Structures are given as C-alpha cells and as structure tokens.
Amino acid sequence: MKFTLILLFVVAAVANAKFEVRNKEDALKAHEECLEDNTVPDEIYEKFLNYEFPEHKRTNCYIKCFVEKMGLFTELKGFDENAIITQFTYKNFKNLESVRHGLEKCIDHNEWESDTCTWANRVFSCWLKINRHVVRKIYGDA
C-alpha cells in the first residue's frame, strides 16, 4: 500500500514535470496581477485574498486569471488535474482524497460551451467549496 502511494506520487510528479509548485508569494503576486486586469472594489478584493469569491461582474475573469497564473488552467486545455493534485498535495499527501473528490465532482470539459471565464469560475468555485481549507494552508492568507 505504501509503495503504491509513493508510486502514484512519483508518476504524478513526472507527468507534471513542467508544472512548478506555487507558494504563498506566488499566490499574492497572482492576486495583485489579476487585480490590475480585473479591477474590483477593495472589499471584494479582500474576500478574494481569503479565497472567497462573491458574485461580482469581474469575479469570473478574476478567477480565470488567478488559476492561469497559478498554472492550474489554460484556455485551450482547461484545468490540469495533475497540476492541481501536485499543487495541493505536495506538503501533505493526506489532502489527496479531498483534492481528488473535488476534481471528480467539479471538473468538466466545458460541455456547456461557456465562455472561458465562466467555465473557470464554475469549476474552481465548485472545487474550492470542498478544498478551501487546503488552498488556505498551501497559499496561506495571501
């Protein structure tokens, strides 16, 4: 069992060789850059920094910007499940079950043909409801 978990982690890491794990400083920089591109009121931005994303006319594209800058999403491929697993389990492999459950429940391949901002927000917001505690531990209170 232990060997299988180690092998799974190694395979995910190798498959994600191009993915670079991000930290609290990277998250803060991404937030700042996304704020420049998607101006929101200060009180909304403070919520974004706490990984709460209330409805606002710019929330969808802000989230798309953030997940792109964190290496978790691209317009062409959508969400990178291996990158998400690597990012949110590298410090604590115990997070794997929660992270995978969120992916299984929330990931879609934009079958609804939404614009990319709506798609990114739909999936990330769904996943975040299950894994907000994990995100906050990894990215800190950015």
Image: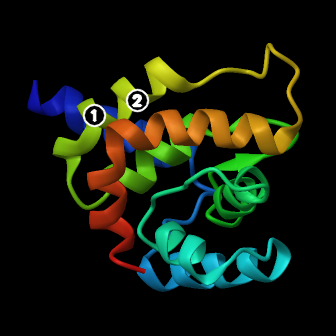
Dot 1 corresponds to which residue?
A: 98
Extreme-left residue of the structure: 1
Residue 124 x %, y %: 57, 42
Count of marks placed on residues: 2
Residue that extends furthest to the top in the rendered view of this protein: 111
Residue 84: percent from left, percent from top: 49, 45
| Residue 102: numbered disc | 2
Q: CA distance from mark 1 to mark 2?
A: 6 Å
Q: Is residue 22 above or below residue 93?
A: below
Amino acid type at circle 1 is Ser
Q: Quarter of the image for the N terminus: give it.
A: top left
**Mark 1, secondary structure of its residue:** helix
**Residue at the image position 79 percent from the left and 77 percent from the top:** 39
Answer with left or right where residue 38 lies relative to residue 21: right
Circle 2: residue type: Gly
Residue visible at 75% across and 34% down in the picture: 119
Q: With 77 as the anchor, is 113 left or right in this view? A: right
- Please report contact status of discs 1 and 2: CB closer than 8 Å, yes or no: yes
Q: Name the secondary structure under disc 2.
A: helix
Crowding near the residue tagged with mark 1, few <14, some 14–19, many ≥20 C-alpha atoms within 10 Å = some
In front: 54, or 105? Answer: 54
Note whether 56 is above or below 2 in the view shown: below
| Quadrant in which residue 18 is drawn | bottom right
